[in-house]
Image: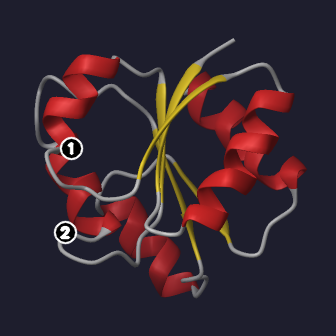
Amino acid sequence: MSKIVVIDDSQAEIQLIELYLKAAHHTVVSFSSTDNLEDKIVTEQPDLIVMDVVMPGRNGFQACRDLKNDARFKSIPIVLCTSKGLESDKFWGQQQGANGHVVKPFKSEELLQAIKLALAE
């Protein structure tokens, strides 16, 4: 399956996402912030990134935009997994380059479907 990097400042959310992804036979590497994110992505070489939006420091929208504007990472799909579920939030995520958007709380099927679609793009 795929190697997926999960970025969320909530350890409980990371554990839940890891549970769902590992059950679907994905390899998971998690980080609790976007600090030094580019270096971590170079090291991990993920197939996809699942990222929260609301985080201290650089938020998920900013980190998504930064990664998509960097030629090294532009082709890595990003699924935003966030409590920000308004249509305007989804639109803004797309404008930043996100390939998918899952609203917390979510079911495992919703997350896995968003990942499947993002990987197929």
Q: Secondary structure at mark 1?
A: helix
| Position of 84 relative to 35 (above/below) | below
How many labels, in total?
2
| Position of 41 relative to 1 (above/below) | below
Q: Position of residue 27 (x, y in %)?
A: 62, 20
Q: Nearer the viewer, residue 67 or 55?
A: 55
Label 1 neighbourhood size at 10 Å, few (<14), some (14-19), many (20+)?
some
Q: Amino acid at mark 1?
A: Leu
Label 2 neighbourhood size at 10 Å, few (<14), some (14-19), many (20+)?
some
Q: Secondary structure at mark 2?
A: loop
Q: Is residue 72 left or right of residue 107?
A: left
Q: Position of residue 46 (x, y in %)?
A: 42, 22
Q: Residue at x 13, y 45 (%)?
A: 36
Q: Quadrant of the N terminus?
A: top right
Q: Position of residue 91 (x, y in %)?
A: 45, 73
**Pointer 1 residue:** 37
Q: Does the image show residue 74?
A: no
Q: Residue at x 32, y 25 (%)?
A: 75
Q: Amino acid at mark 2?
A: Arg
Q: Is residue 66 left or right of residue 34?
A: left
Whole-number angstrom distance, CA of label 1 to CA of label 2:
10 Å
Residue located farthest toward the front when viewing the structure as drawn: 11
Residue located farthest toward the top when viewing the structure as drawn: 1
**Pointer 2 residue:** 58
Task: State if disc 2 and disc 1 touch (CB < 8 Å).
Answer: yes
Q: Residue at x 79, y 19 (%)?
A: 25
Q: Does the image show residue 70?
A: yes
Q: Is residue 97 left or right of residue 69?
A: right
Q: Nearer the viewer, residue 91 or 101?
A: 101
Q: Quadrant of the C terminus?
A: top right
